[in-house]
Image: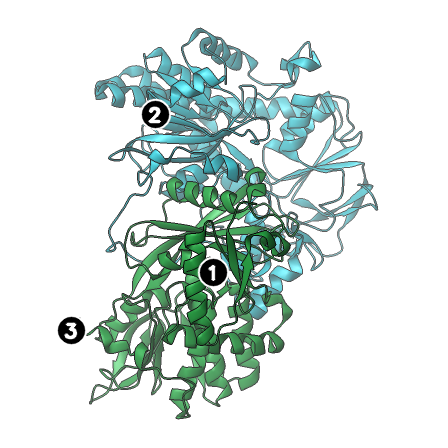
Chain colours: A green, B cyan
């Protein structure tokens, strides 16, 4: 998704772009995600600024791309089970408001006006109307196609072609890449390899500590709209911000236009291990049915694992790498890559074309982990 | 045999692990279960159905009061023998148990937990977990379907489905039934249909039978297969059934249900030969293109697979039926389609091999009985490979469906939508097609359309590209209430907990 967005905005700036992927379109984390475009789960700071920028860009993209990308401004609803949780939510929302997020407090007795099937005993919650969703694989495929149409042949897509080396010149500057199909020359190389971004960085001789953080999603049988928004419990925010390798789960429940309800989100650092974890599924199911008791009778049809590209400070790496002239990074967005993709793509395009940046990218410096 | 899915039995199962859990009570599973039990092992036999026998020995529910259920069956005495031994054994038969996952047990990876839901459709509200030292996977196969215009009309049934209707419901799919597709099942189905009173205007086989003649040695070593073919052939002759080889049903006609089919001549690659269509009136079509091993429980645990000569994936097994994952055995169709006799031999071998492992006595597997079983198995496997190669779908079938033909029936995805995903949106494999079109995301989880989608995803002119090995982390749907009510003590035990150093895996799963 991030690579597709980089190609899209770069082509719009008049650059010619070749997109290389060792797999198919949306073959990595994009194809395993739920397509969250969230501001609600983000602390005020650089990531939230990037999310707010991306929210505006997604809105524009939804007008430019086919409705088949299933863009929905469904809104998010964060709920608390008791008054302590509600107080914490209130404080969090207050700080987000000051950073430009729209929030609406919902009292316990009003929750079911928004979500009729929610458990009756919740203390209250906050509604975030800016939260949205897309179907990520379709969004990536349509974005790539739109990039190509706009650039009239400026964007070339080479799938199933793995990058095996980064070519450099006499002064260490990037000259292109070597792939299984030969050499490809370009003055700039953008590393948008997501969870494998550390490997591509290593090909260029630099360190970028991207690690996989596994998540499972449970998918139910198709239902009429039982869950209208993206609904999750307040402890989700703490889990997202945690750096622990141990398992954390907090149910994020949402309906989809196609019918199935998606239930995330678990986080654990276990490498690239896809083995089914019954304990994760148990926790997700228990937490989801705690929020929506009506789901207890509903069957999970399938489940799948994906790997979020995790950097130790939970911020992506975006921008020029001063260690290798001509190398840019656009990876490490953890679980927010779909949401943050347009902002990231726009920043990359602006860097490449020498235009003014939409926000301060100092916090995303790719070399910030050196010597840490 | 304590034949009961009662609470008492299953709750007991939470405590003491069985020596062996067998999943599937068809030919392979029954043979494995009774053989292991007769060698003294404690055995649990889980099966989704209420009755033993699997697909091959499917028979009417007792309530139908059938007097001679064996009338439609071959080799009934072999089944009667297995059933008698099961009744005399200590095997705990857990009927109506739909297994949704097998995971590693908690004691440092030793042993297994078999997770199941209960009830006729898996809607039971209580999770069942059976612990076992070893597991034998005998989950059989399902039918391969290839789409063509009209294949979704009422009156079109799977060839195996037609057989099942006759065996379990004593029901005919129609009164004038064309049988089409490829594989030995067609002759068996046609002969059953004719015997049961249906008129069969034609058996339409897309391959020729010359494929068998290329390996005369294998044929000579399997005379019983020739006898079977002769029995079916004689029945077809008796009822005047016409066999058309190198032909395929390429269209079904009818408004509300089947009224006729078009039969076209096809070339060696199953490409229709122009202008050679022939219309045959009928009120039902039984169509089958062979069987596909059901392996998702095994692939979920990382068992290695091999590509079979007909482009499906089967489990890689050693000489004693063990998978590439120690402690996990498989028998029957999961290791490659080969029929009931092969399944029994493999079940016997697996039962003995498991006992040898549990007792720590490898010598058990070195006696004459095992060697004899292995020779029989190898001979029948060789025949199965010849059969699979002879009936492998030709790449030209991808020309049968037009753009409006539905390929994924659950999600109503047409061949045109799949072709568009391939030509315009960069999908070159079944997974990406699924992500972009939803083909394979519905109730059957791609069991019906998976093979077809994979071939269409490979693009025009190359319908031979195989599907990837199946991955369905939930083998059957599980109610969320049941999942949430599992015992938390599974914590962490299921994850293999490998460190971050494990290599990258570019093949992620699917989204909504």
- Quadrant where the image shows the C terminus of chain B: bottom right
**Looking at this view, is B272 or B131 the one in front?**
B131
Label at residue A7: none
**Does residue B94 appear to the left or right of B290 in the view shown?**
left
Label at residue A31: 1
- Quadrant where the image shows the N terminus of chain B: top left
First-in-chain label (1 vs 3): 1
Mark 3 crowdedness (10 Å alpha carbons): few <14, some 14-19, many ≥20? few
B120 w.r.t. B76: above or below: below
**Does residue B89 appear to the left or right of A67 in the view shown?**
left
**Looking at this view, is B29 or B285 the one in front?**
B29
Q: Which circle, 2 or 3, is nearer the viewer?
A: 3
Are dots 2 and 3 in contact, CB under 8 Å?
A: no
**Residue occupying image coordinates x 61% and y 43%:** B145
What residue sits right under mark 2 in the picture?
B132
Q: In which quarter of the image is residue B203?
A: top right
Q: Which circle, 1 or 3, is nearer the viewer?
A: 3
Q: Determine if marks 1 and 3 fall on one subunit.
A: yes
**Residue occupying image coordinates x 33% and y 27%:** B134
Disc 2 is placed on an element classified as strand
Mark 1–mark 3 distance (CA, rounded to whole Å): 34 Å
Mark 2–mark 1 distance (CA, rounded to whole Å): 35 Å
Q: Position of residue A90 (x, y in %)?
A: 45, 63
What residue sits right under mark 3 in the picture?
A371
Mark 1 crowdedness (10 Å alpha carbons): few <14, some 14-19, many ≥20? many
A183 w.r.t. B202: above or below: below
Mark 2–mark 3 distance (CA, rounded to whole Å): 50 Å
Q: Position of residue B136 (x, y in %)?
A: 38, 27
Looking at this rendering, what residue extends furthest in the top direction?
A: B88
């Amino acid at each position: 998704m991030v690579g597709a967005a980089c190609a899209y905005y770069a082509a719009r700036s008049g650059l010619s772009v070749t997109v290389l992927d060792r797999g198919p379109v949306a073959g990595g984390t994009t194809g395993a995600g739920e397509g969250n475009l969230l501001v609600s789960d983000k602390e005020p700071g650089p990531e939230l600024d990037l999310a707010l920028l991306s929210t505006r860009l997604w809105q524009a993209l939804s007008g430019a791309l086919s409705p088949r990308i299933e863009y929905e401004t469904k809104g998010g609803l964060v709920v608390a089970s008791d008054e302590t949780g509600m107080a914490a939510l209130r404080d969090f929302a207050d700080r987000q408001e000051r950073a430009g997020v729209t929030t609406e407090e919902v009292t316990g007795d009003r929750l079911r006006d928004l979500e009729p099937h929610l458990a009756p005993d919740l203390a209250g919650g906050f509604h975030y109307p800016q939260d949205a969703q897309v179907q990520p694989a379709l969004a990536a495929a349509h974005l790539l196609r739109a990039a190509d149409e706009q650039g009239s042949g400026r964007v070339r897509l080479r799938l199933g072609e793995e990058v095996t080396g980064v070519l450099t010149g006499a002064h260490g500057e990037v000259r292109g890449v070597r792939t299984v199909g030969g050499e490809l020359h370009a003055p700039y190389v953008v590393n948008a390899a997501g969870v494998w971004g550390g490997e591509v960085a290593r090909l260029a001789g630099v360190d970028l500590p991207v690690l996989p953080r596994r998540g499972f999603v449970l998918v139910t049988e198709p239902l009429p709209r039982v869950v209208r928004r993206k609904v999750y419990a307040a402890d989700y925010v703490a889990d997202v911000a945690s750096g622990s390798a141990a398992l954390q789960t907090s149910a994020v429940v949402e309906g989809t236009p196609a019918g199935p309800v998606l239930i995330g989100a678990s986080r654990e650092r276990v490498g690239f291990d896809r083995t089914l974890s019954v304990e994760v599924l148990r926790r997700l199911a228990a937490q989801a049915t705690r929020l929506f008791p009506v789901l207890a009778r509903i069957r999970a049809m399938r489940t799948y694992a994906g790997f979020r590209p995790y950097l130790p400070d939970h911020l992506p790496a975006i921008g020029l790498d001063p260690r290798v002239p001509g190398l840019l990074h656009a990876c490490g967005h953890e679980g927010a890559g779909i949401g943050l993709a347009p902002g990231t793509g726009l920043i990359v395009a602006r860097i490449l074309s020498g235009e003014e940046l939409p926000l301060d990218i100092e916090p995303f410096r790719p070399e910030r982990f050196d010597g840490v | 045999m304590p034949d009961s899915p009662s609470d008492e039995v299953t709750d007991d199962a939470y405590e003491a692990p069985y020596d062996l859990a067998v999943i599937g009570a068809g030919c392979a599973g029954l043979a494995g279960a009774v053989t292991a039990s007769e060698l003294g092992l404690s055995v649990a036999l889980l099966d989704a159905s209420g009755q033993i026998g699997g697909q091959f020995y499917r028979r009417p529910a007792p309530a139908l009061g059938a007097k001679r259920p064996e009338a439609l069956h071959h080799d009934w005495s072999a089944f009667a023998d297995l059933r008698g031994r099961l009744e005399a054994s200590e095997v705990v038969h857990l009927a109506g148990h739909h297994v949704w996952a097998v995971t590693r047990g908690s004691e440092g990876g030793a042993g297994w937990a078999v997770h199941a839901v209960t009830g006729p459709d898996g809607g039971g509200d209580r999770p069942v977990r059976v612990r076992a030292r070893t597991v034998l996977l005998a989950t059989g196969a399902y039918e391969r379907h290839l789409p063509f215009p009209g294949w979704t009309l009422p009156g079109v049934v799977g060839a195996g489905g037609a057989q099942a209707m006759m065996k379990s419901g004593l029901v005919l799919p129609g009164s004038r039934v064309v049988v089409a597709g490829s594989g030995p099942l067609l002759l068996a189905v046609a002969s059953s249909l004719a015997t049961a009173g249906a008129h069969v205007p034609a058996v339409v086989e897309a391959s020729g039978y010359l494929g068998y003649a290329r390996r005369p040695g294998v044929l000579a070593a399997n005379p019983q297969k020739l006898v079977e073919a002769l029995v079916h052939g004689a029945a077809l002759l008796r009822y005047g059934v016409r066999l058309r080889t190198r032909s395929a049903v390429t269209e079904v006609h009818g408004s509300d249900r089947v009224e006729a089919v078009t039969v076209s001549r096809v070339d060696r690659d199953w490409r229709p030969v122009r202008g050679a269509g022939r219309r045959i009136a009928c009120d039902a079509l039984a169509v089958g293109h062979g069987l596909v091993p059901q392996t998702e429980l095994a692939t979920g645990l990382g068992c290695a697979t091999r590509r079979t000569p007909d482009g499906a994936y089967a489990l890689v097994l050693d000489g004693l039926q063990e998978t590439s994952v120690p402690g996990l055995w498989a028998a029957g169709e999961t290791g490659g389609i080969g029929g009931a006799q092969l399944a029994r031999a493999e079940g016997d071998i697996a039962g003995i091999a498991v006992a040898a492992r549990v007792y720590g006595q490898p010598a058990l597997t070195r006696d004459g009985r095992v060697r004899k079983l292995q020779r029989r198995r190898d001979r029948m496997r060789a025949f199965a490979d010849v059969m699979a190669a002879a009936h492998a779908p030709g790449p030209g079938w991808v020309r049968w469906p037009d753009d409006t033909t539905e390929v994924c029936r659950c999600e109503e995805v047409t061949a045109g939508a799949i072709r568009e995903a391939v030509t315009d949106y960069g999908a070159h494999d079944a997974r990406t097609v699924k992500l972009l079109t939803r083909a394979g995301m519905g109730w059957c989880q791609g069991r019906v359309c998976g093979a077809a989608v994979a071939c269409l995803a490979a693009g025009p002119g190359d319908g031979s590209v195989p599907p990837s090995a199946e991955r369905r982390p939930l083998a059957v749907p599980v109610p969320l209430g049941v999942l949430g009510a599992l015992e938390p003590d599974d914590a962490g035990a299921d994850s293999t907990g490998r460190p971050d150093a494990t290599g990258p895996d570019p093949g992620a799963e699917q989204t909504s």
